[in-house]
Image (cartoon, rainbow, N blue to C red):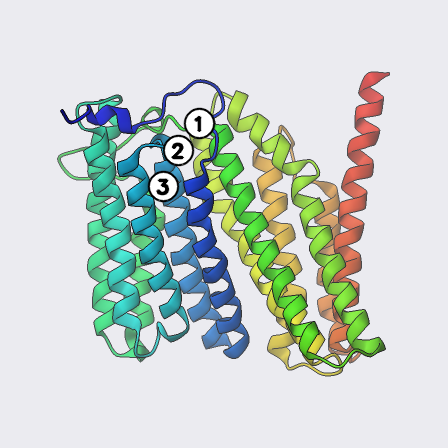
Amino acid sequence: MTPPLSTLLRIREGHAKVGYAELFFDLVFVFAVTQLSHTLLEHLTPTGALRTGLLFLAVWWLWICTSWVTNWLDPEKIPVRLTIFGLMLGGLMMSSALPDAFAERGLAFAVVFAAMQVGRSAFMLWALRGGRGPGNFLNFIRITLWFAMSAVLWIAGGLAEPESRAWWWLGAVAIEYLGPIAFFRVPGLGRSSLSDWDVEGGHLSERCGLFIIIALGESVLITGATFAKLEWNPTTIAAFCMAFLGSVAMWWIYFDSGAARGEHRITHGQDSASQARLAYTYLHLLIVGGIIVCAVADELVLVHPDHAETAGVVAIIGGPALYLLGCALFKWVTNTRRFPPASHLGGLSLLAALALAAAPMHLSPLVLGAVTTVVLMIVAGWETASMRYSEAERKH
């Protein structure tokens, strides 16, 4: 006999462990992040940055929506595992199409992406039918309808000329990102409520932390691969060391205290669904986006340490700034603070001053990269010292 469909859902008993199938699925996004970094590096213009940013929004949304779904589904069950593997195949095809998404592979990207979004939600409906959470079943009816609407725009954009494609896809992204904000309101079906989104906070927090590791790992890989191809001299060795120290500082800023505090808030707070939507679904895209831009900046500094165009300077300073902004907002909403961390605001102020001084002082990419790395290290050390001091004060 066919087992009850409700058995496809996780049994909520404490912290839900991230399954090996989920980790396997994430490997596809190592490739996706690499493709985005290379695409931005090859098209480092305002238009190229906007197009790559649009593709990044799509990739992130696909990943975070899948993480929400696997928060409810049990990856140890064969139908769920096969669905994850099917999504992996689609993700690999989608990632392969990223560099040419605004050229000859636009339709392929759009069809695969839309099929993954709609298909995953349809599977969730099948898994929820007759099982736990009737509110969540209705919630996924609404979600599937929203994804079906955006799918029309994705495919229309894929069929359109490359020059107008971005407008169609911008509309599709807008629909998908506005969905949770609008609680997936559908005429005749009403809107969802936060009580329908009974997430297991620890699992979602861990999943997002792992994605940060993926993005940082991709940055380290790009740095190592680029350095291996260059002549080893004092300049390239200095650039290599600065890139590595910058990656370490970014890891420290996120994982030393922010990740653990965020997990505690979403796990033990009374607003886990709200935290999952704001802190992890929306704000984490700033953090990951910052890492991707930093990876591009590191390669620019390694290859062109003496000179960079304006777009390169923007990437070198903008990557760390975007990362610090995302971390500051994430830590602000996951802690009981009136303001974002002072260390992060101080770091953003230093980066703003550097941006103003870069052109008049004719600072080289190597110097800019070194200064941004020092800023990240200052922020990491400042926050760690202040946290340790606060803990010592509480004990006394």
Q: Nearer the viewer, residue 107 or 360?
A: 107
User: CA–CA distance between discs 1 and 2?
Assistant: 7 Å
Residues tagged 3 and 2 counted as in contact (Cβ below 8 A):
no
Residues tagged 1 and 2 counted as in contact (Cβ below 8 A):
yes
The circle drawn on residue 200 is 1
Of marks 1 and 3, which one's residue comes earlier in the chain?
3
Residue type highlighted by circle 1:
Glu
Mark 3 neighbour density, 10 Å: few (under 14) some (14–19) many (20 or more): few
Which residue is painted at 41% across and 41% down in the image? 21
User: CA–CA distance between discs 3 and 2?
Assistant: 20 Å
Residue 254 drawn at (x, y percent): 65, 44
Residue type highlighted by circle 2:
Asn
Which residue is painted at 23% across and 29% down in the image? 128
Residue 220 sits in quarter: bottom right
Residue that label 2 marks: 71
Looking at the image, is 282 positioned above or below residue 170? above
Quadrant the N terminus occupies: top left
Q: Please state if 343 lies on the left or on the right of 194 as rendered.
A: right
Residue that label 3 marks: 181
Whether residue 350 is visible, yes or no, is no
Q: Please state if 247 lies on the left or on the right of 393 as rendered.
A: left
User: CA–CA distance between discs 1 and 3?
Assistant: 20 Å
Residue 150 drawn at (x, y percent): 24, 55
